[in-house]
Image (spheres, rainbow, N blue to C red):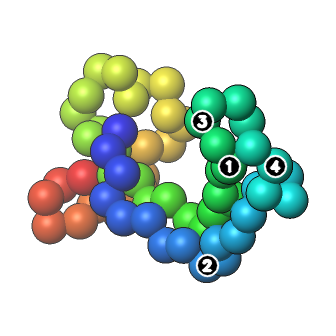
Amino acid sequence: MAVTSIEIKERGPYAESMAFGDTGTYEQLDGTAHFAVDPSDPANGLITDLELAPKNSAGL
């Protein structure tokens, strides 16, 4: 399964910008990750009705 694109809708401080040790502060990202799956890959065999899903130009 490959990520094909990520849409970030909102970005802001996480935990009110609290520092986490030497790492520092984190950001919270809210959005959508889009995936593509290869229907012929045996690893995707457990995805129900995958053969019925529309395919893109790459066959994914």
- Residue 48 % position (x, y): 54, 36
Circle 1/circle 4 CB separation < 8 Å: yes
Q: Label 1, on which residue?
A: 25
Q: Residues within 10 Å of mark 2 (few under 14, many from 20)?
A: few
SS label for mark 2:
strand
Q: Earlier in the sequence, mark 3 or mark 2?
A: 2
Q: Residue at x 70, y 70 (%)?
A: 12
Q: Residues within 10 Å of mark 1 (few under 14, many from 20)?
A: some
Circle 1/circle 2 CB separation < 8 Å: no
With 33 as the anchor, is 22 left or right in this view?
right
- Residue 10 % position (x, y): 66, 76
SS label for mark 1:
loop
Residue type pointed to by label 2: Lys
Circle 2/circle 4 CB separation < 8 Å: no
The extreme right residue here reads 16
Q: Label 4, on which residue?
A: 18
* Residue 23 - label: 3
Is residue 37 visible in the rendered structure shown here?
A: yes
The extreme top residue here reads 42
Q: Label 2, on which residue?
A: 9
Badge nearest the viewer, 2 or 4: 4
Badge nearest the viewer, 1 or 2: 1
Residue type pointed to by label 3: Thr
Q: Residue at x 64, y 43 (%)?
A: 24
